[in-house]
């Protein structure tokens, strides 16, 4: 289990590294480079628009790779999605700016961002099913939290490199070529991830489906026909995780380094510290989900997010780096209460024959609702003087929507008595 969990963690970290490198670049440099005729605010909004395209592509990727995962196995998904995302990310680092290529530059950026999202849309489903379908029943939440730590690891890797380059290079050199280095490094990371995943075995549950002839012929139509309500609920439920995470890691960078004129390197360090803490507490919180249940953790996390969004905005808008750090840490700790357990929760909501499609599409629908819109909406709302309370209202509304969706979903964790009787799965 440890070998499988690490393979899922490393691969997910690499793919999210690719995704987050773009988000940081969008917040810091892509507006002036690719939309120079726009005002600074409009350029940032346009850059976040290309950022949002990746989220729009993710449900399509989950449909494509979910079909592969439910028909042909979870293992092919792990390899193909990583390869696609890695190639697209290297391509982003090679796109000339608007000054060199004209309008073709932002169009190429848009296409590569779409391909990034397509690959990442398949990654999550394959990674969590690798661990969830191998894990002992009473420890499924713990082992399924390893791919949930991938986003934190990927963010730290991408932004650690960006932070180092930002500190070592002048503003002019960073804008000229420094921002491209994290994208170029994605190629080497993708090759490393493919090497680590080359010997991953197919999951026992998919092998059982193959042996009994119970694989779904058309997973997506079956999910839409039979489980459409569950799909909408899981998408709505997941939106709070995306909204809060990208409010902290993407919008807060643009807001504090733009209108508030805070130091870029310092704010990157603040956000990285908050994400590191989130990653460290993910596994312990997932273990609590095995003991107390998935649904109570999700309800608690959504409620905590709803209560913290106004303090978060107030602390962030203070202009004090220490207070901003408190706001970011509090927001991510509230969010991770629910995020830690969804690697086990979402797959358990769907039958094995349609699990790769159903869980992945539901998860990535939340990305459209929460991740794609949040940087754009928050940037648009954060105009004028004073704290941007409209951002707090928006994030609170998303959290309350997720809370309502989780309240309508059933519990899936085994009872303690059942977990005690479960036999460990063979890895």
Image (cartoon, rainbow, N blue to C red):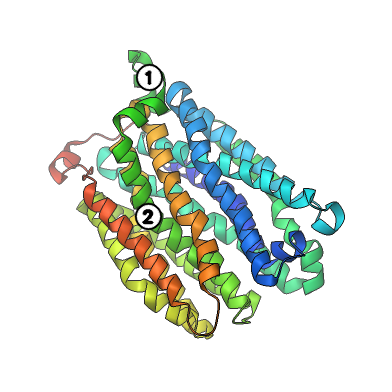
Name the residue located 54 percent from the left edge and 71 percent from the top edge.
252
| Mark sitting earlier along the chain (1/2) | 1
Secondary structure found at label 1: loop
In-image side of 286 versus 327 (left or right):
left
Name the residue located 52 percent from the left edge and 86 percent from the top edge.
320
Name the residue located 29 percent from the left edge and 55 percent from the top edge.
298
What is the quadrant of residue 301 in the picture?
Answer: bottom left
From what the image shows, is residue 139 above or below residue 198? below
In the rendered image, the residue lying farthest to the left is: 417
Secondary structure found at label 2: helix
Q: Residues within 10 Å of mark 1 (few under 14, many from 20)?
A: many
Q: Which mark is residue 356?
A: none
Residue that label 2 marks: 339
**Which percent across, then down, holds residue 103?**
79, 51
Label total for image: 2
Residue that label 1 marks: 215
């Amino acid at each position: 289990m440890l070998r499988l969990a690490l393979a899922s963690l490393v691969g997910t970290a690499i793919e999210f590294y690719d995704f987050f490198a773009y988000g940081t670049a969008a917040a810091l440099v892509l507006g002036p480079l690719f939309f120079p005729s726009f005002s600074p605010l409009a350029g940032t909004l346009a850059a976040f628009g290309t950022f949002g395209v990746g989220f729009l592509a993710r449900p399509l990727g989950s449909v494509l790779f979910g079909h592969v995962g439910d028909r042909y196995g979870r293992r092919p998904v792990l390899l193909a999605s990583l390869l696609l995302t890695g190639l697209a990310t290297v391509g982003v680092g090679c796109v000339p700016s608007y000054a060199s290529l004209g309008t073709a530059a932002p169009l190429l950026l848009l296409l590569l961002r779409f391909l990034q999202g397509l690959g990442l849309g398949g990654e999550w489903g394959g990674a969590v099913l690798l661990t969830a379908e191998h894990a002992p029943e009473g420890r499924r939440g713990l082992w399924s939290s390893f791919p949930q730590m991938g986003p934190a690891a990927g963010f730290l890797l991408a932004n650690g490199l960006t932070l180092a380059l930002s500190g070592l290079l002048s503003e002019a050199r960073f804008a000229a070529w420094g921002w491209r280095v994290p994208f170029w490094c994605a190629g080497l990371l993708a090759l490393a991830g493919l090497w680590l995943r080359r010997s991953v075995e197919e999951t026992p549950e998919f092998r059982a489906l193959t042996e009994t002839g119970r694989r779904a012929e058309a997973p997506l139509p079956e999910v839409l026909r039979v489980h459409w309500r569950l799909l909408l609920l899981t998408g709505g439920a997941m939106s709070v995780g995306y909204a809060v995470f990208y409010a902290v890691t993407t919008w807060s960078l643009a807001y504090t380094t733009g209108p508030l004129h805070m130091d870029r390197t310092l704010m990157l360090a603040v956000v990285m510290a908050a994400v590191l803490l989130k990653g460290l507490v993910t596994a312990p919180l997932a273990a609590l989900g095995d003991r107390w249940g998935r649904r109570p953790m999700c309800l608690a996390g959504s409620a905590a997010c709803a209560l913290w969004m106004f303090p978060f905005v107030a602390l962030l808008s203070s202009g004090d780096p220490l207070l901003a750090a408190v706001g970011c840490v509090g927001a991510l700790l509230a969010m991770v209460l629910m995020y830690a357990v969804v690697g086990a929760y979402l797959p358990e909501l769907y039958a094995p024959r349609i699990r790769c499609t159903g869980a992945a599409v539901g998860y990535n629908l939340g990305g459209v609702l929460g991740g794609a819109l949040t940087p754009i909406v928050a940037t648009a709302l954060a105009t004028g003087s004073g704290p941007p309370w409209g951002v707090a209202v928006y994030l609170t509304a998303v959290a309350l929507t997720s809370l309502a969706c989780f309240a309508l979903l059933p519990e899936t964790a085994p009872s303690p008595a059942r977990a005690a009787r479960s036999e460990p799965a063979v890895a």
